Image (cartoon, helix red, strand yellow):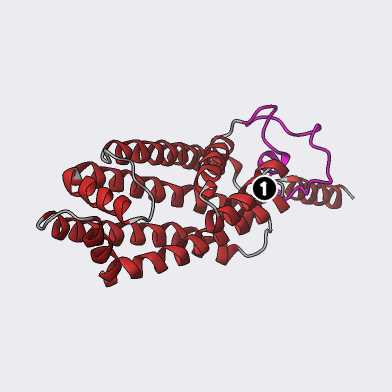
Amino acid sequence: MSGRAARARRGTARAEEPPVDLGRERRHGRIAGILGIVGVLATVAALLVSARGSASGASGTSSEDRARRLTDFHADVGAQALGLGLRVLGLVATIALALFLARAVIDRGGRDGAALRALGIAGPLALVAVLVVGFLAMRDVADVYAAGAPSPDRAKRLMDDDGLLRAVGVAEIAAHLLFGVWLALLSLRAMSVGLLTRVLGYWGIAAGVAGVLLPLGDTLFMGWLASVALLAYGWWPGGVPLAWTSGRAVPWDVPLESGAAAR
């Protein structure tokens, strides 16, 4: 009897152990959280640097706006290059947080683990590729424009006739679509196992959809990324969701008050 009782106790203890190494996950989470914040700060800095490198701030599609954009780009290509570098840094840092959260979802039995990992790499890298190629194409057109007589009609013609710029425009739509699918799917799966609150889950889904259709998508994503970075680091107002501390999936029909303690 004593042997059977000991084996039963050992079996019960094993059953109560979390299926993931929580200590290891917390260490990785802190690194991923810091990188996520770095991604947010780098992206904000990129926007500020790029804006300073554009004297006119022209962003429309008229001939006059295009002429001003080409003039600004050529006049301060260094600031545009720095802005590009910061934007790339922000996206690369996002990959680290994406892979960490995907791993946490997989460890808790979440669905679409392979897709989350693949999209978490492909989505940000697709945007990186579009940004780099778009910068190179814009630089070449701006150099050609600066070498001749300034004219709004000439600026429009140069940009419309450049095949690489046109290709970048199409690729940008595809890249944002891929990124949006990743963001929405990750938010949905992380929410389904209890890693993200409902607010963050629906926020990420909304940001993924808006990123394809509306300019507001980038702002929504930055807010989501900052929030998830803090959550991955181990801090959240009122304590992190129970799925983080239990190491198991905890659907949101389970009350959080009993276990939503900060790590």
Label 1, on which residue? 201
Prevailing secondary structure class for the magenta stretch in the rendered image: loop
Disc 1 marks a residue whose amino acid type is Gly
Q: Quick one: 165 or 122, which is closer to the camera? A: 165
Q: Is residue 88 above or below residue 233?
A: below
Question: Residue 123, position in %: x, y?
Answer: 47, 60
Q: Quick one: 24 or 164, which is closer to the camera? A: 164
Q: Is residue 257 above or below residue 14?
A: above
Q: Is residue 19 left or right of residue 144?
A: right
Q: Is residue 260 magenta?
A: yes
Residue depicted at 48% across the width and 42% down the height: 32
Question: Residue 51, position in %: x, y?
Answer: 32, 39
Local crowd size for mark 1, using a 10 Å CA cut-off: few (<14), some (14–19), many (≥20):
many
Residue 56 occupies quadrant: top left
Query: Secondary structure under badge 1?
Result: helix
Q: Is residue 107 above or below residue 30?
A: below
Screen quadrant of the C terminus: top right
Residue 234 occupies quadrant: top right
- In the displayed orientation, state which residue is furthest to the left: 147
Residue 107 occupies quadrant: bottom right
Q: Quick one: 168 or 100, which is closer to the camera? A: 168
Residue depicted at 69% across the width and 50% down the height: 191
Q: Which residues are magenta?
A: 236-263
Question: Residue 130, position in %: x, y?
Answer: 35, 61
Q: Is residue 213 magenta?
A: no
Residue depicted at 84% across the width and 46% down the height: 253
Number of callouts in the render? 1
